[in-house]
Image (spheres, grey):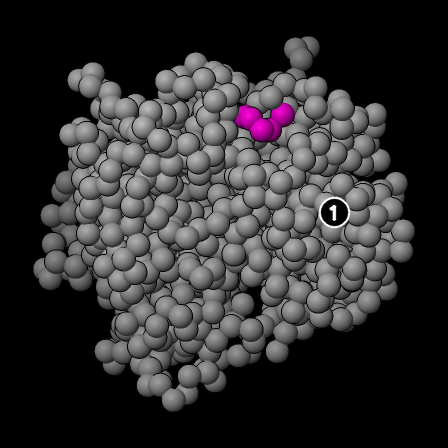
C-alpha cells in the first residue's frame, strides 16, 4: 500500500517578466539547484525526474524536456512530462509524489517551469482556429463573466477584489523571489487602476512571468530530519461545457478538496489549516476558491476576506508568498503553491513565514476552471 | 572581439489543416441559413448548443439535431475595455453568456447595439445575423442584441 | 509490486485527414476498450491520456478529449505531453499505491493535420539544432549512415525490415531488390524506410490483479515496465546504441514477440541489439508503425498489438516499446505475459 511521502527540499527562481539572463536550461537549473541545496542532495542522488509545464507553444519548442534532459540531471533516468493546463504545477507534484508513494523510487525531483518570453504568447494562446466563434479576450475575458456571476450570487461588495489584490502584492514584497512586489499598494490604489474586463481591473490581474519551481520528494527512509510530509493529495477534472455545469463553484474543485481533506483528517479547513497557498490569478478567485474548498458556506467567502481572516494574522492567511497575483510562470504556478505550502510547515518561509505553521494546503487549477490538484502538507509525519 | 550572442531569433511557421466534424459542420451550415442548431442527448435529453457529436456528460453520441429559438437570456457578462489582436468590435463592448430558450448550456458571444453599461444579467436578447456574403462560418452570427419586447 | 493486467484494448484503424472531433474519437476508442474489458466507465478510478499540442495544432488540445471520456461526475484524471505509453506508465504507478484498481489509458494523434516532420523538427535543441532545420527523418538517416559505415547493417537489411513489415500489413512481401531499386528519399533512406503519418487513437484498460477477481478477463500481465532517457544532442551520443532502451529493458527475460515503435527502419537495427532480441524473436507481427505512424499513439498501440498476440496464443511473452526524441533518445519497455 501507499508509502509516506516526504518533502525534503523546495527551490524556485527569481520570477520576472523576462529572464534574458538565462536559457531555458539555466532557468530550470536555478530552481532545481536551489531545491537540491535545500534538501542537502546533489543531482546524482535523484532517481527520477517529473517535469510539468503548460503548452509548448509558449517557448516555441516541442517537448523541451527532451533537449533539456542533461540539464535536468535526467540522463539515464526515468523522465515524465505532465501537461494539465494551469493546474500542471500541482499535478506534477502529485505525479512525482505517487512515484514515492508507490515505492518506485527513493528520491524524485519535480520541476515545473515556463519561459514564455522566449516565444510570442499571443501566437501561442490566441490563434484564430476555424470552426470556433471569434470571441476571445484572453483569460481575463473568459473569467470576468464568472467573477461577475459570483458577485451577483453572493452580494459581495466591490472592494473585496481590491482588498485581496492589495494584500497579495504587499505579501509579495516580503518574498524575495516574487515578480511583482508592491509594498505600499492599498485597496484604494487598486480601485483606481484601469478596468480591463469589467469587473476585473488591471491591478486585480496576475502578471505573466518567466520562472521555475522545483521540489525534492523522498521516501520515509531517505527523508531528512526537517522534512515536510504529504498528508493528502488529489486531482479532479470535469469537462469544459455541459448542461448543469457550475463554473463559478465547480464540482471538480469541491471533490478535489474533499478527497485531500479526507486523507488528511480535515473536517474544518479554516480552523485546522494554518495557511494555504491557492491559485488566484484574478483577485476575486480568493473568496470563490475558499467557498469551493469548503472554508465557509457558499456566498460567505467574501466575508472571510472582509473580516481579515485571510490576511496576515488572520485565522488562515491565504497566499503569504503573494501567490499567483505576484508571480505567474504558468507551468510553475501550481508547484509554487505546493512548494510554498511545504516551506511554511518546515519553518523555512523566511520573511513571509506564518508563525507556527504546521499544516498547510497547496492548490492549483487550470483550463476553464476544470482541472484541480491539491495537497496538504504537515510538519508531523501523517 | 565581438559581443557574445545572447539572443537568436528563429521564426517558426507551421500550417495545419483543420477539418470540421459533421456535427460542427451542421452547426456552421445552420448559421449560414440563420438557424441556431443545437443537439439533444439521446440518453439524458439535455440540450446543448452548438450541436456536438458526443454528449460530454454521457460520453455517447450522436446527439439529435435541434433548431433553437434566436432568443435567450444573459446569465452573466463582462465588458472588454482593452484592444487585442483579432478583435471584431471596438472596445468597450460586452461579451455575454447567453442561455438560449430551450438550451441547457450557455453560448459565449458578443453583445451589440447596446451601450456596454446597459447590459444586465437577466436581460433578454436576440440573435443578429450578418448577411454579408463574405462572412463565413461563425461570423454569420454577428452578435446578440437586446430584445425590445419584455 | 502489485500485479497489474491489461484487461481491455482498442485501437482505431489509422486513417488520414481525420476530422477535428477528438471527443468522438476518444469516446469510441475508450468505449471499445472498456467493452473489451467488460467494465463500465463508472468502474474506472483513474484516467490518464497522452497527446501533443503541437501535433494537434492547438494549445491545451487535450481538453477536447475530456468530452469523450465521461468526466461527469468529476474524475481523477491526468495527462502527459507524451506518447500514451507513458500515460500507461503513470496509471500503472498510481495503481501501485493501492488507491486505484481500474485505470483507463488513452492516446490520440492527428499526424496528417499538419506537417508532422516540421513539427517534430521543433523537438530539437532550439539554440543549436533547430536552426539547422533538421527533422526526425534527417536524424534517422544520420543514424542509418552510422550503422552502414560501421558495418553494423547493410542497406539490404533495412529493406528486408521494411519488406517484412509491409507483408504483415498487406499480406504480400515486396522483394528487397524492388524496394532498393526505387530512388533514395533521404540518403541512405528510401521511402520504404520512412513512416507514413496517420491519424487515430488507442485505449487500454488496466486492472489490478487482486481486484475484480469474480470477473473473467483475458489478461495480459505486465511483468516489467520501465523507461529511461539519454542525452539529447547527437554529437554526445553513439547513434548506433540506445543505452536508455537497454536500461529500460533491464533483465526482464526472454520474449517471443516484440512490438517496437520503429517508424524508421534503422531504429530496429539499434533496438534489436539494445533490447537483446535474438533472431528467434518475431518483431512487429502487427506490421509496426511504419505504414501508419500516429504521433503520441504508436507506443500505446504497441501495447495493444502485444496484448492481442498473447490472447491469440501466438506468443507467451511479448515486449512493447515506445520512444521519443531524435534517434531513440527516450525509451519505454514493457514485458507482458499471457495468463
Q: Position of residue C268 (x, y in %)?
A: 34, 56
The N terminus of chain A, quarter of image: bottom right
Q: Which of A34 and C108 is in front in this view?
A: C108
Magenta stretch contains residue A171:
no
Q: Which of B117 and A178 is in front in this view?
A: B117
Q: Is residue B84 left or right of residue C155?
A: right
Which residues, given as a range, are shown in magenta? Answer: A197-201
Q: Is residue C219 left or right of residue C238?
A: left
Figure quadrant of residue C143: top left
Q: Where is residue B17 in the image (x, y as percent from the top left)?
A: 26, 33
Query: Which residue lies under the disc numbered 1?
Result: A304
Query: How many C-alpha atoms fall within 10 Å of the one at disc 1: few (<14), some, or many (≥20)?
Result: many
Element class at badge 1: helix
Q: Where is residue B28 in the image (x, y as percent from the top left)?
A: 22, 34
Figure quadrant of residue A270: bottom right
Magenta stretch contains residue A198:
yes
Kindly identify the residue that appears in the image at 79 percent across and 59 percent down.
A271
Q: In this view, does A312 lie to the left or right of A297?
A: right
Kindly identify the residue that appears in the image at 35 percent across and 80 percent down.
C219
Q: Is the magenta stretch mostly helix, strand or loop?
A: strand
Kindly identify the residue that appears in the image at 31 percent across and 77 percent down.
C38
Label 1 marks a residue whose chain is: A
Kindly identify the residue that appears in the image at 79 percent across and 44 percent down.
A307
Q: Where is residue C150 in the image (x, y as percent from the top left)?
A: 39, 48
A43 w.r.t. A67: above or below = below
Task: Specify whether residue C84 is in view.
Answer: yes
Q: Is residue C28 left or right of residue C205?
A: left
A300 w.r.t. C136: above or below = below
Q: For the view shown, which residue lies furthest in the front direction? A: B150
Amino acid at each position: 500500500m501507499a508509502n509516506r511521502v516526504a518533502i525534503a527540499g523546495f527551490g524556485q527562481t527569481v520570477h520576472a517578466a523576462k529572464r534574458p539572463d538565462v536559457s531555458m536550461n539555466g532557468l530550470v537549473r536555478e530552481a532545481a539547484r536551489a531545491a537540491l541545496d535545500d534538501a542537502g542532495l546533489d543531482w546524482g542522488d535523484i532517481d527520477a525526474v517529473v517535469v510539468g509545464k503548460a503548452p509548448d507553444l509558449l517557448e516555441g519548442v516541442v517537448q523541451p524536456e527532451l533537449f533539456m534532459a542533461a540539464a535536468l540531471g535526467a540522463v539515464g533516468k526515468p523522465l515524465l512530462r505532465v501537461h494539465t493546463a494551469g493546474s500542471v504545477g500541482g499535478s506534477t507534484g502529485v505525479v512525482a509524489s505517487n512515484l514515492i508513494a508507490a515505492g518506485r523510487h527513493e528520491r524524485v525531483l519535480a520541476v515545473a517551469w515556463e519561459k514564455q518570453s522566449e516565444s510570442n504568447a499571443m501566437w501561442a494562446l490566441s490563434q484564430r482556429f476555424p470552426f470556433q466563434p471569434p470571441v476571445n479576450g484572453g483569460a481575463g475575458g473568459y473569467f470576468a463573466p464568472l467573477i461577475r456571476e459570483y458577485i451577483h450570487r453572493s452580494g459581495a461588495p466591490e472592494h473585496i477584489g481590491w482588498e485581496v489584490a492589495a494584500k497579495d502584492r504587499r505579501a509579495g514584497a516580503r518574498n524575495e523571489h516574487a515578480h511583482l512586489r508592491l509594498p505600499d499598494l492599498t485597496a484604494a490604489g487598486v480601485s483606481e487602476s484601469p478596468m480591463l474586463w469589467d469587473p476585473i481591473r488591471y491591478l486585480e490581474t496576475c502578471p505573466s512571468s518567466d520562472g521555475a519551481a522545483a521540489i525534492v520528494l523522498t521516501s520515509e527512509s531517505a527523508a531528512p530530519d526537517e522534512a515536510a510530509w504529504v498528508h493528502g493529495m488529489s486531482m479532479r477534472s470535469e469537462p469544459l461545457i455541459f448542461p448543469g455545469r457550475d463554473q463559478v463553484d465547480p464540482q471538480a474543485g469541491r471533490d478535489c478538496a474533499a478527497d485531500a481533506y479526507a486523507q488528511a483528517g480535515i473536517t474544518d479547513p479554516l480552523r485546522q489549516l494554518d495557511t494555504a497557498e491557492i491559485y488566484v490569478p484574478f483577485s476575486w478567485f480568493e473568496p470563490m476558491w475558499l467557498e469551493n474548498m469548503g472554508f465557509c458556506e457558499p456566498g460567505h467567502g467574501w466575508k472571510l476576506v472582509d473580516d481579515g481572516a485571510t490576511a496576515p494574522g488572520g485565522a488562515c492567511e491565504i497566499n503569504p508568498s503573494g501567490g499567483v497575483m505576484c508571480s505567474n510562470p504558468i507551468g510553475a504556478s501550481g508547484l509554487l503553491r505546493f512548494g510554498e505550502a511545504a516551506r511554511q510547515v518546515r519553518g523555512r518561509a523566511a520573511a513571509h513565514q506564518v508563525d507556527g505553521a504546521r499544516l498547510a494546503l497547496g492548490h492549483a487549477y487550470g483550463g476553464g476552471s476544470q482541472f484541480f490538484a491539491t495537497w496538504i502538507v504537515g510538519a508531523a509525519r501523517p | 572581439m565581438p559581443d557574445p550572442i545572447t539572443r537568436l531569433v528563429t521564426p517558426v511557421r507551421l500550417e495545419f489543416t483543420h477539418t470540421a466534424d459533421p456535427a460542427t459542420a451542421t452547426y456552421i451550415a445552420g448559421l449560414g441559413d440563420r438557424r441556431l442548431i443545437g443537439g439533444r442527448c439521446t440518453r439524458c435529453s439535455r440540450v446543448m448548443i452548438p450541436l456536438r457529436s458526443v454528449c460530454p456528460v454521457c460520453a455517447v453520441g450522436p446527439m439529435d439535431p435541434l433548431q433553437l429559438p434566436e432568443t435567450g437570456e444573459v446569465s452573466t457578462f463582462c465588458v472588454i475595455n482593452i484592444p487585442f489582436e483579432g478583435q471584431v468590435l471596438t472596445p468597450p463592448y460586452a461579451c455575454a453568456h447567453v442561455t438560449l430558450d430551450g438550451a441547457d448550456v450557455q453560448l459565449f458571444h458578443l453583445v451589440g447595439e447596446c451601450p456596454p453599461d446597459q447590459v444586465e444579467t437577466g436581460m433578454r436578447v436576440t440573435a443578429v445575423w450578418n448577411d454579408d456574403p463574405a462572412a463565413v462560418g461563425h461570423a454569420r452570427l454577428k452578435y446578440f442584441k437586446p430584445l425590445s419586447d419584455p | 509490486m502489485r500485479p497489474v493486467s491489461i484487461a481491455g484494448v482498442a485501437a482505431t484503424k489509422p486513417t488520414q485527414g481525420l476530422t477535428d472531433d477528438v471527443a468522438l474519437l476518444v469516446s469510441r476508442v475508450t468505449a471499445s476498450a472498456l467493452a473489451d474489458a467488460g467494465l463500465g466507465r463508472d468502474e474506472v478510478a483513474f484516467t490518464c491520456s497522452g497527446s501533443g499540442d503541437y501535433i494537434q495544432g492547438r494549445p491545451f488540445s487535450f481538453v477536447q478529449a475530456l468530452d469523450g471520456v465521461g468526466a461527469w461526475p468529476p474524475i481523477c484524471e491526468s495527462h502527459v505531453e507524451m506518447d500514451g505509453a507513458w500515460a500507461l506508465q503513470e496509471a500503472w504507478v498510481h495503481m501501485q499505491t493501492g488507491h486505484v484498481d481500474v485505470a483507463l489509458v488513452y492516446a490520440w494523434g492527428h499526424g496528417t493535420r499538419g506537417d508532422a516532420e516540421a513539427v517534430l523538427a521543433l523537438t530539437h535543441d532550439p539554440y543549436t539544432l533547430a536552426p539547422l532545420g533538421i527533422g526526425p527523418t534527417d536524424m534517422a538517416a544520420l543514424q542509418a549512415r552510422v550503422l552502414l559505415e560501421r558495418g553494423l547493417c547493410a542497406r539490404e537489411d533495412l529493406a528486408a525490415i521494411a519488406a517484412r513489415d509491409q507483408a504483415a500489413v498487406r499480406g504480400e512481401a515486396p522483394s528487397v531488390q524492388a524496394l532498393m531499386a526505387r530512388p533514395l528519399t533521404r540518403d541512405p533512406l528510401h521511402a520504404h524506410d520512412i513512416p507514413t503519418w496517420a491519424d487515430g487513437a488507442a485505449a487500454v484498460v488496466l486492472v489490478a490483479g487482486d481486484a475484480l477477481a469474480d470477473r473473467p478477463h483475458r489478461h495480459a500481465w505486465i511483468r516489467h515496465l520501465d523507461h529511461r532517457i539519454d542525452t539529447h544532442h547527437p554529437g554526445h551520443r553513439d547513434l548506433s546504441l540506445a543505452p536508455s532502451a537497454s536500461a529500460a529493458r533491464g533483465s526482464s527475460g526472454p520474449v517471443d514477440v516484440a512490438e517496437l515503435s520503429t517508424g524508421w527502419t534503422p531504429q530496429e537495427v539499434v533496438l534489436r541489439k539494445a533490447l537483446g532480441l535474438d533472431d528467434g524473436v518475431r518483431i512487429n507481427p502487427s506490421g509496426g508503425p511504419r505504414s501508419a505512424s500516429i504521433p503520441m499513439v504508436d507506443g500505446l498501440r504497441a501495447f495493444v498489438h502485444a496484448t492481442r498476440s498473447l490472447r491469440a496464443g501466438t506468443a507467451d511473452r511479448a515486449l512493447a516499446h515506445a520512444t521519443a526524441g531524435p534517434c531513440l533518445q527516450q525509451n519505454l519497455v514493457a514485458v507482458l505475459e499471457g495468463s
